[in-house]
Amino acid sequence: MRRRWLLPALVATALLGGAPASIGAQDQLFRINNMVEPESLDPGVVTGVPEHRILSNLFEGLTTTDPNDLSPRPGMAKAWTISKDGLVYTFTLRDAQWTDGTPVTARDFVFAWERVLNPKSGAKYAQQLFYLKNGEEYNRGRTTDFSQVGVKALDTKTLRVTLKNPTAYFLDLTSFYTLYPVPKWALDAHGKDWVKPGKIVSNGPFRLTGWVPQRELVLERNPQYWDAASVMLRKVVFLPTDDINTAYKQFLAGESDWVPTVPSAQLDAAKNKPEYYVSPYLGTYYLRFNVTKAPVNDLRVRRALSLSVDREALTKFVTKAGEVPHSAFVPAGLRGYQGPRGLGFDPGAATRLLAEAGYPKGRGFPKVELLYNTNELHRVITQAIQQMWKEHLGIQVELVNVEWKVYLAKQSALDYQIARAGWIGDYVDPNTFLEIWKTGGGNNQTGWSSTRYDELIDQAARLVTATDRLRTLHDAETILLDEMPVLPLYTYVNKGMLSRKVRGWHPNILDQHPLKHLSLER
Amino acid sequence: MVGYLVRRVAGFVPVLFLIISLSFFIMRLAPGGPFDLDRALPEQVRANLEARYRLNEPLWTQYLGYCADVLHGDLGPSFRYPDRTVNELLGLGFPVSLLLGACAMVVAVCLGGAAGLLAGLHRNAPLDYLAMSFALFGVSVPNFVLGPMLMLLFALALGWLPVAGWGTWRHLILPAFTLGTFYAAYVARLTRAGMLEVVGQDFIRTARAKGLRESTVVLRHALPSAILPVVSYLGPASAAVLTGSVVVETVFSIPGVGRYFVGSALNRDYTMVLGTVIAYSALLLLFNLLVDLLYAFLDPRVHLQ
């Protein structure tokens, strides 16, 4: 029976083979497993990565990102000038429209930024605008006069921004959602409902046409967008599948075209499929020490613990997705930055240090707990480290598993000894990895403090020349790795599945893929 | 009868009030709060947020404020989804969960009833063993295992049904079976026991002696009496199906209330936790009442006073 179809099928294939391979405009439908229901679509409210995947296509900031290396490209601003001292940015806006036909003006940016900094709005990412002159003061209520803050609409198409310090990565920040313009009239008309389909007014390459919570969110090509001619995708569907195994199966069944993660248990099978992709990610997986508690208040103990972790074995046999063993805190491969190396694997030196600290062969080592939050991967990683410390140092560490919020609360209260942790960069610059360790920083949570370190970080923020600034950050990271409030383990990777129909996709260290550059082909 | 109903419904008020109060304070004992995020918020930002959501007030003021809002039918804004109110999210989720629950009950009754009937009629024959093996399988395999197994078979291997999602009747089949199988197993055992008890009784022998066809004997005379225990099981089962859909909704990515039930507790989305607790409690109380009414209707020995 089957054979009879073979000949016509061959003929058809031969005929179709001559036709262009691109998929018709009607079929340019891209479905993304976004893994979770977005918390909000309000650029001034959101804080997460899944929200970024949606909002970065719905709105557009002063700058956008290059799909290849994420460097800033003109967005709503067609050009800008920077003053010699690096403090004053003057942006010239292009002629662009909101989806309701209103022109995008400099005032829309001033309105949005005031709203984020206004203490009454309680924006979680207000600190993204603390780089502005008097931004933090306004958020703290020290000044209530917004004209004191460093953002001003000189006319409808000119925006002048004055910074507190020359911030080398400021143009990276202007492509981030917290700094998007917001249409005041839509908020006035609909209140918090302004982000819903039919009410939302946006200015990006796509517009919102459907949103049913926990079911799907639909974007369609925005014909009003200034660069609409280069947008190929007609429709994009975001699926909020929570269960990572289900999301993976949806991809395999052809119900989605991109799933940005793969369940650990499926890695070996996934690696054999042509749709699997893996690339370095701007994130560091590490252990945090509470330097106010014995025995990890002793630097020798911290160094011994670090020297006895075999990072190569950890990434090869435990995490298995191609994570990069790394003993410095700033991930490798940041534009122009060469960091210090950190401590490698040397069990002999570790044993000697531990003996020096008063625990020869681990004898007399007090009870120590290693805290982690509920997650299969964290469980196996902490178990592997527990085993390495037992084998190389002869010490027994107890694993403590708690749920996410308890884990966060215990760390911020310094109610732990050692904890697993991860840090994902906000922007492509070493500063996002290093400034968090300043004394009393909200994300420090180790009790560690170094005046010299704080000075170097502050000094780097004031430097305009890139080489000077990066050298200063290098010196700061050297102090961090010498004093070891943290034990870096590896650099994260993006791992996911992408349909082979997708064109215009570039792997990059934030796994950000602006949809305006994508298209589908057979 | 009307007096009975009024008294029962009036009795709901203190029960719900107690549930709200207990949940409110127990929830606050859990470490961490809605604004503990993986990136710590600057102190000022955090203080601004807490002021906005009234979390900086003393606990008892917050409690009184919340109770007042609930009396006005307002369950408050969601902490996690600031664009939406709890009322809105529950309003979107409940119809979905109810539809899923209803389909699961249909699966339970049809599948379980048929299996139990066959088993009862062919006692100790291979068909009986087969049906009872199915029942044993149904109660022993948890739905977080059954769901993915069905997905692998019917969605990935055979390609007959979608893996997950919501929107068409085809999306409903796998989750309804996953959720209903456990209860189908119970229904099967209850029906079988009911049939065994009934077929031995005099009125069945009389029916057969009158020369009625076997199908008439079974379906018209034996079955109605045999499924009485099943009917009384349906009330608690319906409530259990509704509150038990949490796992199935997550596995199959279904936009029901169950998705919020666990998620909101883990996120410390205080208003959402209370909203789901209130909604589920009200539903359970209502089902208990319905079961009591149904008993009175089916069994003349029960009088509602």
Image (spheres, coloured by chain):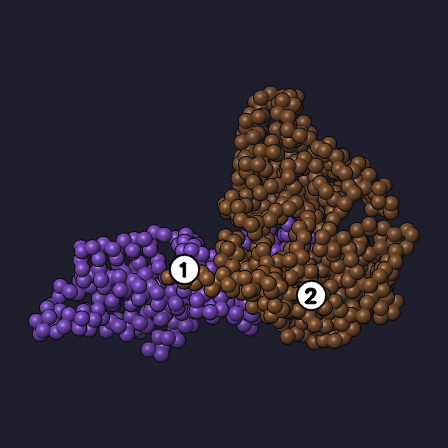
Chain colours: A brown, B purple
Identify the chain of the residue marked 2, using the numbered disc in the image.
Answer: A
Q: Which mark is residue A3?
A: 1
Identify the chain of the residue marked 1, using the numbered disc in the image.
Answer: A
Q: Which of A344/B302 is in front?
A: A344
Amino acid type of the residue tagged 1 in the rendering: Arg
| Residue A107 horizontal/vertical position (percent) | 81, 69
* Disc 1 to disc 2, C-alpha distance: 43 Å
The residue lying at 64 percent from left, 65 percent from top is A233
Is label 1 or label 2 in front?
1
The mark that comes first in sequence, 1 or 2, is: 1
Report whether B303 appears left or right of A90: left
- Please say if B145 is above or below B209: above
Circle 1: is it few (<14), some (14-19), or many (20+) Cα within 10 Å? Answer: few
Amino acid type of the residue tagged 2 in the rendering: Val
The residue lying at 25 percent from left, 67 percent from top is B228
Residue A514 lies in quadrant: bottom right
Mark 2: which secondary structure? Answer: loop
Which residue is situated farthest in the right direction here? A84
| Residue A512 horizontal/vertical position (percent) | 67, 54
| Residue B221 horizontal/vertical position (percent) | 18, 72
Q: Which residue is tagged 2?
A: A231
The residue lying at 79 percent from left, 36 percent from top is A475
Q: Which of B61/A172 is in front?
A: A172
Mark 1: which secondary structure? Answer: helix
The residue lying at 56 percent from left, 64 percent from top is A16
Tell me whether marks 1 and 2 sit on the same chain. Answer: yes
